[in-house]
Image (tube, helix red, strand yellow):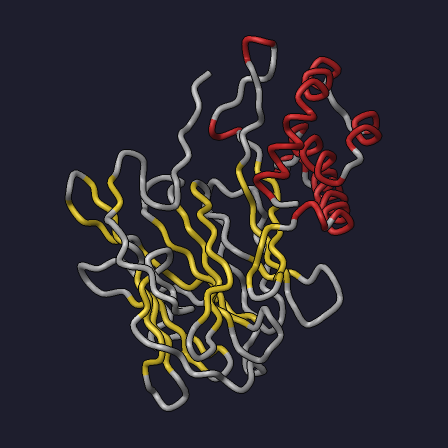
Amino acid sequence: MALAVACSGSGPPGSTVAPPPPAVASPHPSAAQPSVSESPVVPKTSASVASTPAPVPSADAAEPQTTLPPGFVQVPWDAGQGIVCGALRVENVLEAGHPPFVRVWDGSGNKVYEARGRQYKIEDVPVRMSLTVESCGDTTGDGVPELMMSERTEGAHCCYTYYVVSMTRPAKRLLMWDKGDGGHGLMPVKLREGRVWQIRSWELVFPPFDVDAGDPVLSYATTPAYPILFDLVGDQYVKRTFLFGDALRAMRADERDACKKAPDACWWDELSEWGYGLIIGDWETEKTSAVLDVELRQRLDVRAKQMKTLLRKRLGP
């Protein structure tokens, strides 16, 4: 069975990553994240942020188009002078001959933050990744906006690294996720009461199938995508998908309902039922009510324990 090779966040397959500079004890993005030129100010409020449509997911995304919640703003590529986010102005900079990068200005017009993608090498030629802000808003509830940024090597599907950076003084990285394939973006979601927002994306997970043993044959295009949920633990966003069973149960119900209403636009399938059931913990009961081919269900049962272990490793406890 031919499988697509997933990229690592450090560069495309076959490339040589440029050695990082010495590590520093600064909370600024360093060699492990986009380079930063200056420290941003601490804005007093994010009340001026408006709700705008979220970016349309890429062609390899499993998620339908959604809308950013109130208090968050999309930062488009062609925003001209940028988008207001709290007390800051955020822009994706497009300069001829350079990949996109990020700049942030304060209310007085002073540049307070700049970040560019990391470099890697292709046949000893340095290549810099693009880095863009997808959205901005206060995910931590402390009155200081966070930038949700996407770093990409370019090329089909690959390779993505996602960041959440708080615009404190100095700037502080809250999340670095070497996603690899699939540009699914980051979406703030409120899954429990409180001022802190969780962050949702999607992770492509190839099941531990053995075709020679009778397991299904999958291609890259049919690789299932499952939700991945990050929660703020201390001062870092970490993977915590398995701890949000109620939220996932509601998401599953919504997707089932959407498929009944619009079958032709439905991406929900047997592997979706399987993965969600394993994460939530009710596969044994749900598999009897879901419309599944008997032979396929038997093969999924055989791989259920392995798949649950894989999902927990990839999506978080």
On the image, the x and y values in percent for residue 82 come to 38, 75
Image label count? 0
User: Which quadrant of the view contains residue 121?
Assistant: top left
User: Which quadrant of the view contains residue 208?
Assistant: top right
- In this picture, residue 30 sits left or right of residue 21: right
Among all residues in the image, which is located at the extreme bottom? 108
On the image, the x and y values in percent for residue 315 come to 60, 43
| Residue found at x 53% / y 78% | 144
| Residue found at x 74% / y 62% | 192
| Residue found at x 66% / y 45% | 317
- In this picture, residue 34 sits left or right of residue 277: left
Closest to the observer, 125 or 233: 233
- In this picture, residue 134 sits left or right of residue 236: left
Among all residues in the image, which is located at the extreme left? 124
| Residue found at x 25% / y 38% | 15
- Above or below, 288 against 175 in this view is above
- In this picture, residue 192 sits left or right of residue 74: right
- Above or below, 306 against 241 in this view is above
- Above or below, 115 against 276 in this view is below
On the image, the x and y values in percent for residue 294 come to 75, 15
On the image, the x and y values in percent for residue 277 come to 74, 35
- Above or below, 268 against 287 in this view is below
